Image (cartoon, rainbow, N blue to C red):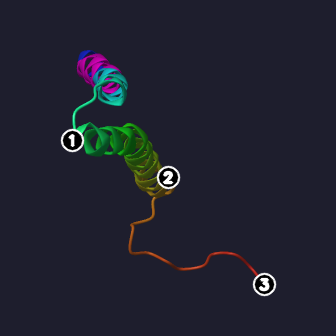
Amino acid sequence: MNKVKRILALTGALLLVCLYISTLIFALIGSPVSADLFKASLAATIIIPVLLYGYILTARVLAGKGADRETHGQSPDDKTDTSKD
């Protein structure tokens, strides 16, 4: 599992580097479509890491909730309140 995580992390880092390089190239070339390509590359440079962070955060939270319920012997559908008033 750690090997898969390392490969995915390296792939993600390589993708980000490629996005940064393409953003720089699109900013420097003088083609008529370079402005649109620059905007798209800049948006992807911002949006992709934010979406990946949100996905990872959601996966951690959801995985943590399932583990807590299993530890305490509750099923996910069991929503009874055991606190005393």
Res 68 label: 2
Residue depicted at 39% across the width and 68% down the height? 76
Marks 2, 3: nearer the viewer: 2
Amino acid type, residue under disc 2 in the picture: Asp
**Towards the viewer: 10 or 34:** 34
Residue depicted at 69% across the width and 75% down the height? 83
Cα–Cα gap, marks 1 and 2: 52 Å
Amino acid type, residue under disc 1 in the picture: Val
Give the mark nearest the N terminus, 1 or 3.
1
Which residue, given by chain and number where applicable, does mark 1 sit on?
33
Find numbered disc 2 in the image and state the secondary structure of the residue it sits on. Answer: helix
Find numbered disc 1 in the image and state the secondary structure of the residue it sits on. Answer: loop
- Label 1–label 3 contact, CB within 8 A: no
Marks 1, 3: nearer the viewer: 1
Q: Is residue 10 magenta?
A: yes
Outermost residue to the right: 85
Give the mark nearest the N terminus, 1 or 2.
1
